[in-house]
């Protein structure tokens, strides 16, 4: 496929996604050329790989990966290996604390026990799946809910039943619309300082990846009130709630702020400045 054809296909995907969305705006359409350029560069640019890890380098400690490697019997547990570094990087701050964890998508139940072991006795795990057979995985400290993650009415009932969620891991149907609805219904419900993590954003779910890229653009919105020696801007509702939107291969992580950031302020220090 030529670069021109790749760019055309990419732009067509983005336009179709935008047109189908009720949130399509003039501002969003203005971003399309830049989004297409970024996609094209990511697909065709030159990205030299880092050096291989030295053969004698000691493995980095990761209790989740250790649990996975030791789990050879019992309820099925299926994960991409690079996920474990992502999990531990964003979730280790909850270890040993009271934490309420929702995993969407139970499948064969193995990950529920992994989270319970990882976070410790202070955690409460909520598993959600569309398959009624998953009720078999209910256990001490693990509640199981049967529901459809694409059903907004179900999410409303779930929020009433589970008033606190600190961590949400979406490993459900992997359909972009399911992922979008889950994010929109639950991100505001996640506690300050909490973490949303969506897995398996692969080729089938590229529309959700595009949605997340558009969502992340809101991190850079700014309306400045400029003064002589500083600049200030009032955070948008999104900026006042969300600390970061991080994308990894097949995974998106959104971290929420623990405290209100107040004004974003830029200060000047020093006495010598160029005249321009």
Image (cartoon, grey):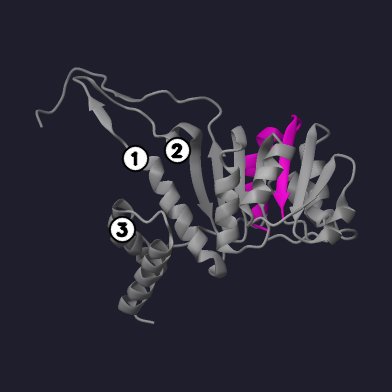
| Residue contact between numbered discs 1 and 2, judged by CB atoms under 8 Å | yes
In the rendered image, which quarter contains the N terminus? Answer: bottom left
Q: CA distance from mark 1 to mark 3?
A: 16 Å
Which residues fall within the magenta stretch?
A: 81-104
Q: Earlier in the sequence, mark 3 or mark 2?
A: 3
Q: Which mark is residue 29?
A: 3
Q: CA distance from mark 1 to mark 2?
A: 9 Å
Which residue occupies 39% across, 44% down?
218
Q: Earlier in the sequence, mark 1 or mark 3?
A: 3
Instruction: Provide residue 157's location: percent of width, then percent of height.
Output: 70, 44
Camera sees residue 5: yes
Q: Is residue 88 magenta?
A: yes
Q: SS at mark 1?
A: loop
- Reading the image, the residue beneath label 1 is 221
- Reading the image, the residue beneath label 2 is 238
Q: Is residue 46 magenta?
A: no
Which residue occupies 38% across, 64% down?
19
In this view, which residue lies farthest toward the top? 271
Q: Earlier in the sequence, mark 1 or mark 2?
A: 1
How many labels sit on residues?
Answer: 3
In this view, which residue lies farthest toward the front? 153
Is 218 located above or below residue 180 in the figure?
above
């Amino acid at each position: 496929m030529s670069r021109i054809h790749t760019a055309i296909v990419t732009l067509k995907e983005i336009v179709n996604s935008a047109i189908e969305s009720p949130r399509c705006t003039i501002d969003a359409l203005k971003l399309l050329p830049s989004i297409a350029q970024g996609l094209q560069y990511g697909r065709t640019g030159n990205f030299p790989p880092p050096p291989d890890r030295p053969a004698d380098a000691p493995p980095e400690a990761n209790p989740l990966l250790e649990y996975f490697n030791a789990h050879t019997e019992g309820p099925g547990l299926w994960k991409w290996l690079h996920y474990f570094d992502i999990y531990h990087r964003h979730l280790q701050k909850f270890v040993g604390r009271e934490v309420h964890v929702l995993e969407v998508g139970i499948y064969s139940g193995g990950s529920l026990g992994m989270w319970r072991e990882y976070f410790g006795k202070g955690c409460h795990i909520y598993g959600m799946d569309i398959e009624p057979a998953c009720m078999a995985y209910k256990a001490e400290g693990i509640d199981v809910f049967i529901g459809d993650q694409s059903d907004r009415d179900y999410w409303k009932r779930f929020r009433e039943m589970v008033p606190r969620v600190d961590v949400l891991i979406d490993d459900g149907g992997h359909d972009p619309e399911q992922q979008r609805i889950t994010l929109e219904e639950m991100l505001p419900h996640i506690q300050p300082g909490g973490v949303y993590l969506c897995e398996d954003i692969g080729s089938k779910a590229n529309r959700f990846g595009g949605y997340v890229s558009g969502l992340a653009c809101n991190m850079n919105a700014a309306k400045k009130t400029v003064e002589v020696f500083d600049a200030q801007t009032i955070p948008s509702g999104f900026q006042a709630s969300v600390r970061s939107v991080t994308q990894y291969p097949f995974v998106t992580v959104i971290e929420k702020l623990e405290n209100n950031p107040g004004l974003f302020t830029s200060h000047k220090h020093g006495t010598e400045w160029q005249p321009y």
